[in-house]
Image (cartoon, coloured by chain):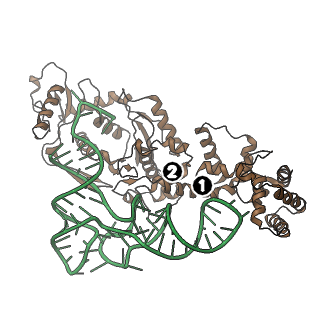
Chain colours: A brown, B green
Amino acid sequence: MVTRFAPSPTGYLHIGGARTALFNWLYARGRGGKFLLRIEDTDRARSTPEATAAILRGLAWLGLDWDGEPVSQFARASRHAEVARAMLARGAAYKCFSPPEEIEAFRAAARAEGRSTLFLSPWREADPATHPDAPFAIRLKAPRTGQTVIEDAVQGRVVWQNAELDDMVLLRSDGTPTYMHAVVVDDHDMGVTHIIRGDDHLTNAARQAQIYAAMGWPLPVFAHIPLIHGPDGKKLSKRHGAVGLEEYQKMGYPAAGLRNYLARLGWSHGDAEVFSDAEAKAWFDLSGIGRAPARLDLRKLEYVCGRQIALAEDGALLGEIEAFLAATAQPPLTAAQRDALLRALHLCKERARTLPQVLEMAQFALASRPIVPEPRAAAALDDVSRGILRELTPHLQNASWTREALEAAAAQVAEGRGMALGRLAASLRAALAGRSVSPSVFDMMLVLGRAETLARIGDAAG
RNA sequence: GGCCCGUUCGUCUAUCGGUUAGGACACCAGGUUUUCAACCUGGGAAGAGGGGUUCGACUCCCCUACGGGCUGCCA
């Protein structure tokens, strides 16, 4: 089986498009099929190489790998024309000499009078001998009676009366193919067996089915998925905030979290909420896709991302962090920082929902001496606190470097002073991390090691 | 205007004729805690409206309302 994602390169990769791509990818990857990419760049005015690059970059970041080289629809124009001529030859299409302005005028008048705007070309049954020597479009000779039926894997059986569908243009009078025709020819030639796309194409499916029928090509399975809406239930647009996938990357959502969240948006597998890619591939099925549009909920996205961060392997998480730093134009990690981060990551995963939050928690490992405490942390380093830190120092020098021993040493000193361990911990946190929020102070000590820990405490205690 | 699709807690959803309508996010209360989180326990919260069909409808049919899509020699 073969699926595909076919975006128009007219801008960034839309979050909705990313989900469509994800569904196609999951379906193919879960079944040992192929996932192809086609760039629908026939609109020369709006298509740009930059947009194509942005889309490929977005898919790569999301972790959706495609098979083979991306296909350019524009590059296949001659093939589209060839098929249109073949349809002409077999009588499935005809030359229409009606000038576009004339058709437009007809439609305008029909609309104004409340009549059907369905245009029936007078050239449909014309004798070729009467053809003028003039520009013509090639139109599909669509059936005028009966029905066109799509057994949609998501929407169910959808029926159109053929009398309500007009003869669509396949090839324009300038010889270029229309979108409707190019899509069918490409999907057929690429061997696409399952078309999973937004339900804004549901009506198009009827017209495309007519082309498949005219060529005698087998109809692929259609699955028209509902679009993603904004929190207000309206179609997702820029006024809702972020719509481009790259914006989500820059906000620090990990790709694994986005994959998980997006998969659950409009699709479900029982009560499963947080799952791995392997599980998603194994479970994903067209029958699990809902029919109603889903709204984007950033809070749940964050929750899922938090869980995925907690579940991530350190190496994979490090990769996500480095991609995040690059995407947000921050300085890359030094080799020493990489090592330190790798050692500290297990302390930061459980308590972060986004990558910047991981970095925030890992600050103690990334920073180097002298640690300059933030104002909030500095308050925990008054004269009394520094005295206590000095008192604690010899205990730490002698303690075995285990969490239990370190905690016992601190508890002993705190008790001796008749103070709560929490207050001593705050001072240690300020000395070790320079922050008022960090992982457990004893965990930080284990990661930093005895020498670094004592050096930082010495710096702070004066 | 015509055609087509949709409508379960605030949000994502389960249910595929018989359930006290389940789960998750969010929210509220409590617990745990060296910070922030995380985590644990408990709580409130839903079938758009109206007709049918049926012993019995969230589930099937019809109408209405409200959303959305298509209706191009755009994609």
Relative to residue A85, is residue A3 depicted above or below?
below
Q: Position of residue A368 (x, y in %)?
A: 78, 44
- Residue A272: % across, % down: 48, 63
Q: Quick check: can you spot residue A216?
A: no
Which percent across, then down, holds residue A51?
45, 33
Toward the top, the furthest residue is A133
Which residue is tagged 1?
A309
Task: Determine the CA span between mark 1 and mark 2.
Answer: 11 Å
- Name the chain under label 2: A
**Amino acid type at mark 1:** Ile
Seen in the picture, residue A294 relative to B58 is either above or below; the reply is above
Residue at horizontal 37 percent and vertical 44 percent from the top: A192
User: Circle 1 — which element?
Assistant: helix
Q: Quadrant of residue B69?
A: top left
Task: Report x, y in % for residue A246.
Answer: 51, 41
Earlier sequence position, callout 1 versus callout 2: 2
Horizontal placement of B35 versus B61: left or right? right
The residue pinned by badge 2 equals A258
Task: Let me know if residue A77 appears in the view.
Answer: yes
Identify the residue at image location x=45%, y=48%.
A22
Mark 1: few, some, or many residues within 10 Å (few <14, many ≥20)? many
Closer to us: A264 or A121? A264
Out of A456 and A362, give the one closest to the viewer.
A456
Amino acid under disc 2: Leu
